Image (spheres, coloured by chain):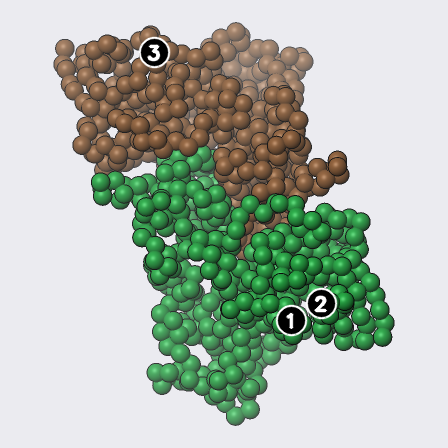
Chain colours: A brown, B green
């Protein structure tokens, strides 16, 4: 048995692990950091869909290990088998032991595989795993396929299939819920996304589940619950991800009621020398404080920064409790974003909501070329006026526009305060100052509230 | 003498006047609103530069009067000669009197004409006036010109000349300060803008003033202070704008020390029934509380909303004191933004500042097409950690990115709180979650602060 010692051990090499290690090293430069991961090479998780089309090659979506070596963080490829909490030792699969002072678990998540579904063991049934070799294997195999079906119309399913569609395949998205991206957007926005996706030549089946994946050895089709058979020579399961917490669980670290590693405000687990960050770590909703199963690289990185800063002492930097999930996606020059509680979820939680949607443009005057329509919907609590959530449709600036609403939510801003926010505008970059969509959406809510008095 | 009566009279028909009237009508629908303006047709002020190139026609930059008529706001074209404060009457140049309950002055600003400069009376010497007929006249005359010089390298000078440059003219910007856009950006950014502007074929003369505009009847050239003569068959003076306050001043309304109409937090002048908004109205800096001469359409619209909401009763909506100036501009696919106190201004004001600049990319992975470099600079007060200002270089999303920093300033956020802000990221829309530039810039500041302890 080979024994090594490090001050801080980070398990997991994707975004959360990297940021926890680099942030930690920044704040505690005298400590020795070691990052252990299974994968030889790391790919950028949110970039994976683009490997299937625009990028063509997984090497173009890789994170260089320079970010670690430049920061003087040691790297080891291997698998951690167990954590001895009492003696602060991790046991590896290569017969080494690593003694640590502080441990950060960034073990991420794994694709959900529906074991109950007949045919999932067939050849050419894939998941979107965050593993370079596996993605390369799919890419190779898809080359010979013409008809491809994805089961699940969430972000990964839709983004991957919009990319595969660019390679001239016949692609179909099957979503059991009433709309694609149903969990993230309100209905009017999902309808708009569906129309866009269809106009790009993608087949979309909504409101229908999959009964069976058909085939002898290889996939030949998908049987839907309504009896329809869709021909397919490959099927991609994109039914979401589950937390990868077996290492923590088997080592006696507390897991919460929805299967995430329990953490406090500073990302400390039930053992204060062991932190958890990213997909595997508990998140509580910023508004409701309920545990939620959000898996976002941006959230993971925020958590990783918090953990890194607070490894050896609390630096009281975290000014918020709870996660604000901010989603965005883009198809060609169209962007869609959502933050916080969308209308249907706010209602489900019991809020008395009032909403305002404003349709405008992302440049001004509209006669400028490449002007794109822009829509902002704000969801507020009627009594307090506090912004609970927002949704955006736009062009290239939609990703930052939804971040503005996110920052407003984080600062507990109200409809009233949004009415007079100070913004900058420019003809080529933003909506006009007279019709800045976030302010106009707040104005619509304000008008609804006035008419009640 | 023809006498009319209205509840609310708005003088001035550009962005501030329109938004004051429409917001006022929204909050006080039972009141009668009348907007009086000189111009037959209104052009979008910030869109004026694009008339000279991309738009080609001032009609493509006009604001339709539908925004007024749709909101049931009466419109009258004419000139207000005087305000009788005691009897609440405005006298017009067509021999009518308008009796009002509330008056909003949105009289804007006028181009500065340097009377001391020899040659300004020559033919083909223009200013950028916010007047459609005048702009149309320049457009017609410029058609026959080949060499055009602008005196003044502020936003208007640079934007107008980048557009004129697209029409295959030989254009030169002359700026007396050490760099173009010197008042808005720190030096390193102005240098980058200069390089970009030059690479687009525009001649830039910095650090040198103009002694004389040369010509007999028509302009033939510009004589610089260093003796150089630049040939020119047209000269555009873009030396800034001065508040248009003569109506207010002559009517006994208080004017502040820098020539703006004095207002309180709710945009009320020395007479509480008379409001002033936009370029003509007093602004105080959000950080220093000093009167400042900022003229921005976005600021004007925020003020107009505040005035409109508070016309008849204070609705206590204004949660901030002071103006946060947010500038942005764009040349082709490059954007530049600045907000609050930039470094040199913060130092001039006496702040002990600490800054952080981060260079990254606006998409991820970088291998995606159309990835643009992105830079964020944050300026903070060393002791309090409060963000004082920020600057941005980027692509299409730069206009909203600078707005995010603006919202952080408005919420008095600190470096510490920026370190853990929750943002959303997407490969095609934003920087990577591991290197979101606002957070990374805060991290650089944080590191500087740590190394001091």
Q: Which mark is residue B85?
A: 2
Q: Quadrant of the C terminus of chain B?
A: top left
Query: The disc numbered 3 marks a residue on which chain?
Result: A
Give the Cα distance between marks 1 and 2. 8 Å
Disc on the earlier residue, 1 or 2 = 2
Instruction: Locate residue A47: give its quadrant.
Output: top left
Left/right placement of residue A214 relative to residue B250 reads left
Query: The disc numbered 1 marks a residue on which chain?
Result: B
Assign a secondary structure to mark 1: loop
> Badge 1 is on which residue?
B252
Image spot of residue B180 (x, y percent): 41, 67
Are dots 1 and 2 in contact, CB under 8 Å?
yes
**Dot in front, 3 or 2:** 2
Instruction: Locate residue A22: give its quadrant.
Output: top left
Are dots 3 and 2 in contact, CB under 8 Å?
no
Q: Which mark is residue A276?
A: none
> Badge 3 is on which residue?
A253
Assign a secondary structure to mark 2: loop
Q: Residues within 10 Å of mark 2 (few under 14, many from 20)?
A: some
**Dot in front, 3 or 1:** 1
Residue A398 in sight in this render: yes
- In the displayed orientation, state which residue is furthest to the right: B2
Query: The disc numbered 2 marks a residue on which chain?
Result: B
Question: For this rendering, which residue is in front, B11 or A57?
Answer: B11
Q: Is residue B59 above or below residue A77?
A: below
Question: For this rendering, which residue is in front, A69 or B350?
Answer: B350
Assign a secondary structure to mark 3: loop
- In the displayed orientation, state which residue is furthest to the front: B86
Left/right placement of residue A1 relative to residue A188 reads left
């Amino acid at each position: 048995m080979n024994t090594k010692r490090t001050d801080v051990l980070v398990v997991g090499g994707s975004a959360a692990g990297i940021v926890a290690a680099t942030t930690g090293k920044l704040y505690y430069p005298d400590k020795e950091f070691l990052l252990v991961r299974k994968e030889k090479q790391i790919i950028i998780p949110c970039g994976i869909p683009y490997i299937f089309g625009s990028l063509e090659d997984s090497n173009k979506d890789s994170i260089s290990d320079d970010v670690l070596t430049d920061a003087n963080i040691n790297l080891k490829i291997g698998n951690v088998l167990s954590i001895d909490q009492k003696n602060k030792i991790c046991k590896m699969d290569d017969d080494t032991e690593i003694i640590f002072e502080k441990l950060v678990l960034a073990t991420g998540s794994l694709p959900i595989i529906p074991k109950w579904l007949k045919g999932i063991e067939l050849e050419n049934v894939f998941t979107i795993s965050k593993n370079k070799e596996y993605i390369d294997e799919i890419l190779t195999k898809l080359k010979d396929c013409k008809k491809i079906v994805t089961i699940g119309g969430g972000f990964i399913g839709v983004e991957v299939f919009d990319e595969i569609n660019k390679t001239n395949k016949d692609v179909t998205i099957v979503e059991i819920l009433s709309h694609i991206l149903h969990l993230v957007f309100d209905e009017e926005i999902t309808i708009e996304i569906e129309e866009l996706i269809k106009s790009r030549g993608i087949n979309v089946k909504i409101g229908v589940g999959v009964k069976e994946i058909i085939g002898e050895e290889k996939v030949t089709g998908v049987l839907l619950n309504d009896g329809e058979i869709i021909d397919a020579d490959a099927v991609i399961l994109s039914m979401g991800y589950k937390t990868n917490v077996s290492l923590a669980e088997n080592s006696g670290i507390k897991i919460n009621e929805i299967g995430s590693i329990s953490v406090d405000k500073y990302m400390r687990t039930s053992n204060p020398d062991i932190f958890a960050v990213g997909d595997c770590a508990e998140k509580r909703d910023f508004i409701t404080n309920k545990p939620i199963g959000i898996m976002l690289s941006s959230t993971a990185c925020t958590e990783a920064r918090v953990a890194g800063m607070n490894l050896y002492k609390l630096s009281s930097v975290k000014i918020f409790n709870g996660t604000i999930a901010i989603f965005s996606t883009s198809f060609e020059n169209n962007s869609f974003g959502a933050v916080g509680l969308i209308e249907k979820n706010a209602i489900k939680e019991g809020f008395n909501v009032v909403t305002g949607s404003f349709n405008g443009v992302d440049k001004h005057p509209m006669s400028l070329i490449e002007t794109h329509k822009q829509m902002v919907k704000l969801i507020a609590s009627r009594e307090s006026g506090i912004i609970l959530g927002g949704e955006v449709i736009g062009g290239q600036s939609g990703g930052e526009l939804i971040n503005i609403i996110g920052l407003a939510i984080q600062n507990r801003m109200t409809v009233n305060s949004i009415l007079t926010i100070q913004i900058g505008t420019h003809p080529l970059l933003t909506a006009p100052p007279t019709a800045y969509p976030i302010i106009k959406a707040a104005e619509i809510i304000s008008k609804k509230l006035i008419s009640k008095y």
